[in-house]
Every structure is written in C-alpha cells, then in structure tokens.
Amino acid sequence: MNGQPTADVVDRIKDIPLYRASIERGYFPVLEKPEIARGFPDNWMTPGLAAALAAGEAEMVLSTGTNHARMQIIRPPYFLLKSYYRLWSEHPDIADTWADGCTRVSLTTVLATEHVARVNARKRGEEPAAVPAPADRWLDDRTCYLNLRLDPARWGREDVERMLAEIRAAARAHPRGRYHLDCSSSHLAHLVRKARAWGLWADFPPPASIVHAYEYTPANVARYLREHFDCPIVDLFGSTELGYLYSSDRSGRYRPFLDGMSVELLPVAPGSGIHSLIVTSVRNPWMPLVRYRSGDCVRTLDGSADPDRIARFCGREKELLATSRGPVAQGDLDELVAAVTPRTFLHRLDVTGPGDGAVLRCTTFDGVPLTADETDALAGEAGRLTGRPCRVEHHDHLPIGASGKYAWLATTPPPAAGDSHGGTR
C-alpha cells in the first residue's frame, strides 16, 4: 500500500493551494505538521472556505496539545463533538446510554472546561468569569464539564464534594438515574481515590457507561477503573484535527471508525515494530488531510505495517526514547510497569544523556511505597528495556503538564517532582 489518495480525494482537494504541487507531480509525500502551519491560513484558503468562515460554518481553533506546541486548524463548529456523539450513538457497548438520553458528564482537563466557558461567554458578548459558573460549563444540552483545577492531584475535599454533587444532579435528571461519564482516565482515577479516601464513595452514583479519551490510558489505570465501575468502559482514540478514529470494545480490541478516512502505517525506524500512524481524511471538509502524520504510534498484532492488525496505540512519536535496541514508546514502558505490579498509578522516566542512567518516578494508588521486591523488579525490567541503569523512586505526587496531561518521559532533569521518599533501588 503506497498511501496515495484516490481520485475522489484528489478531486475534493484540487482547489487547496497546499496540495497543488503534489497534484501536479502526481505524488503526495507524507504531510508533516510544519507544512500545515506554513503560510496558514492562506495555504488552505479556497472561495468555499472563505465563504464558510464568513458565515460561521468554519472556525479556526488550536489543537489541544499534549506536551508539545499546539497547532492551528480549521474545522466546522462542534466537529469533534459531533464525531464523539456519532461514535457514542453507534458503539454497540454504549449506544443504549445515547439512545436513553443520558447526560454526558465530562471530567477532563481544566483547559477543556475553560474553553466551554469562553465559548458561552462569547455568545453573550461577555468576558468569561475567572471561575466558570455551573451554567457556563454546559457545552450543549447534553454535555457538562466538571473540572476547575489544572492538577487533579490537588483537588481538595470541597472540589470533590462539588463534582460529586454535580454528578448526582445529572443522574437525578434521568428518570432511571442514568448518566454517561466521559473522562481523561487519570482524572477519573484521582476522583475515585479521593472519594474513597474521604468516605465519599457512597455519594458517587455509578455511571451507566464510561468513555475515556484525550490521552494515553495506562494499563494499571484502566484496570483500576474496571475494578471500581461495573459498566461498559470504552477507550477512544482520535485528535482535534481528525476526530475519532478507533474505539475499544469490551474485550479491549480496537474497532475502526474511519468514515471518510484511510490509514497507513510506516515504521518509525528500520526494523522497528512501532509504526507511525499516517491518515488521509476528508471528514473535515475545510481542512482535508492527505497522508498526514498524526504524531501517534501504534503496534500491530504481528509487528507488520497492516493497519487492520492494530493492537494498541502506544504513545507519541515525539516522545519515543532512543535506545541501542531501537526506539521505546510510552506503551512499552507502561506494559512493563503493569506486568510487575498493579499498584503503580502514575510513572515518569527521567533520562539525561545517552550514556547516563535513568530514574523511574512512581506514585501508587494507595500512596504506600512499593516493596523492595517490586522496586528491584521494576528497576531491573526498566533497565533492560532502556539499556540504562535505572533506579526507582516513590513519590507522593507527580506534577501534571500545562496542557492538563501527564508526560511519561522527561529527557532533561526537571525540578523536584514531589516529595521523594528514601528506599530507592
């Protein structure tokens, strides 16, 4: 598969300045993010797009970013939301909560909450409040946002009580007390831990369905959520610029959701089983992307470049760690950590120069440091994976990034990450 677009796709993009040279050559190279930004928005401008922008049928927004620069994109209003709603309504494990009219309660980054508040304030011709009121945190008549703090580890009892009260209100609004919980998985795990620790678990009504999206979900976090919620839990994979592409089912297998899209895989390095996800999509009519490098990495069931055999999404290409045995992805370390112990909650690998050692910083779900045996096993396995001597440190807290997402890898020594404990290996 050479990934070249079909005649139908070429016909749809023929007026977009960015693609003129490729159309003339008859060959489309992989589209990198800097090319999208170069000359923006003129490199995308067509008479149809100009009219759509003037009529409010297209908008310019920034991608959410993870731990890298955000990218300006053009899309129809509510593009990502409509992609979510369609997938929710069609997914066999959770479609019943859509059809049943359940409210979608969203527990994700504070940046998402603030975005919704800005949109609502703009509609009224006002500036958003410093702390958005509950009414300003409704995206539409179906979705409300909960989080008002950057770092969920810093939620106090008052924060947790408020969020649980808003969840109970959403459940009471349904005739059978049902609601759909949308989340960043680590945010939800923080809420579960705090509700249980403060005797508030009985005040947390069980959701009828859960979707976690927006960031990589560590295996131990996924397991922790399954232990505490007896309902379908679906993992979504997608991006601001593309919409949603895949969703997991009850067994953990990923189902494609590729309407208006095609996918190809390219090895990130010769001989590597990690592949870059390359997407051609006309789902967004104002910014169709041809052979776009999404920046995401995948592994397949057999290590091949067959997109029909994608087994898991394993992190970001910019966050790969180079080792003597080839690149290592976030998912590789995460799989190792989960295999050693289910007690680890958050973890981050700190590395410096190529020949130096590494520090694996960990928190636990119960706050109790890992045992000496667990620590030694983790240090040994992480050392074998990375080709570096590795020590493991327990922390009470690992800080979240400015984007409201966690980094798995720090390639320069960061400031003190939290209250470190002795007994490292």
Image (spheres, grey):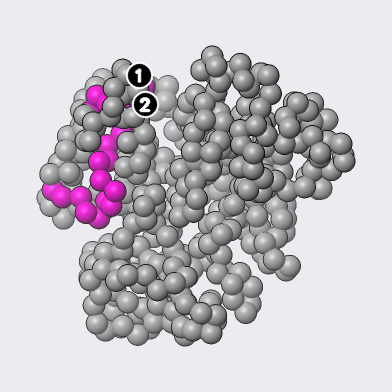
Please tell me whether residue 204 belongs to the stretch shown in magenta: no
The residue wearing badge 1 is 123
> Residue 182, position in %: x, y?
37, 38
User: What amino acid is found at the position of numbered circle 2 in the picture?
Assistant: Val
Q: Is residue 322 above or below residue 46?
A: below
Instruction: Write the residue at 53% across / 57% down.
Output: 315
- Asked if residue 354 can be seen in this view, the reply is yes
Residue at the spot 87% in from the left edge and 39% down from the top edge = 26
Residues 77 and 2: in front is 77
Q: Which residues are magenta?
A: 134-157
Q: Assign a secondary structure to mark 1.
A: helix
Judge whether residue 179 can be spotted in this image. Answer: no
Give residue 167's quadrant in the image. Answer: top left
Residue under pointer 2? 119
Determine whether label 2 and label 1 are within 8 Å by CB: yes
Which mark identifies residue 286? none
Q: Closer to the camera, 16 or 337? A: 16
In the picture shown, does residue 389 fall above or below 119?
below
Q: Tell me the residue at 63%/22% (across/down).
A: 49
Foreground pick, 334 / 318? 318
Residue under the point 70% across and 60% down: 267
Q: Residues within 10 Å of mark 2 (few under 14, many from 20)?
A: some
Residue 238 percent coordinates (x, y): 54, 42
Left or right side of 207 for 81: right
| Quadrant showing the C terminus | bottom left
Mark 2 vs mark 1, CA separation in Å = 6 Å
Label 1: few (<14), some (14–19) or many (≥20) C-alpha neighbours in 10 Å: few
